[in-house]
Amino acid sequence: MEANMAYDDFKKSLKAKNDFCIYIEDENGNVILAKGSSKLNEDGFNCKELDRKV
């Protein structure tokens, strides 16, 4: 997976049928990558896409 891959392309590559959010953390628990559907934000979840270089 490329960090800059669009959510819809990533979802298709996983063959996922439902929306999702994935967070990847470093060894200190800091989120370094978040990839997910903006639709989840409407339901009170916080799934803002994030890409931090470590």
Image (tube, rainbow, N blue to C red):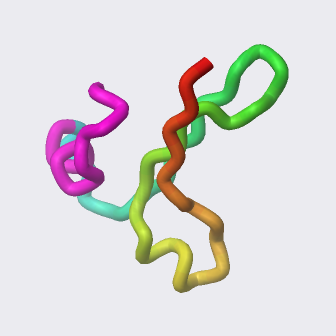
At a point 36% along the width and 32% down the height, the residue shown is 3
At a point 42% along the width and 76% down the height, the residue shown is 39
Location of residue 48 in the rendering, given as x and y in whole percent from the top left corner: 54, 60
Location of residue 21 in the rendering, given as x and y in whole percent from the top left corner: 49, 53
Residue found farthest to the front = 53
- For residue 31, side relative to residue 16 (left or right): right
Residue found farthest to the right = 28
At a point 67% along the width and 28% down the height, the residue shown is 25
- For residue 6, side relative to residue 44 (left or right): left
Q: Nearer the viewer, residue 34 or 52?
A: 52
| Residue 52 location, quadrant | top right
Q: Quadrant of the N terminus?
A: top left
Q: Is residue 45 above or below residue 31?
A: below
Q: Quadrant of the C terminus?
A: top right
Residue 11 lies in the magenta stretch: yes
Across the whole image, how many numbered discs are drawn on residues?
A: 0
Q: Is residue 25 above or below residue 54?
A: below
| Residue 41 location, quadrant | bottom right
Location of residue 18 in the rendering, given as x and y in whole percent from the top left corner: 33, 62
Q: Is residue 39 above or below residue 37?
A: below
Q: Nearer the viewer, residue 15 or 8?
A: 8
At a point 25% along the width and 40% down the height, the residue shown is 5
Magenta segment, which residues?
Answer: 1-13
Q: Nearer the viewer, residue 51 or 8?
A: 51
Location of residue 26 in the rendering, given as x and y in whole percent from the top left corner: 70, 20
Residue 10 lies in the magenta stretch: yes
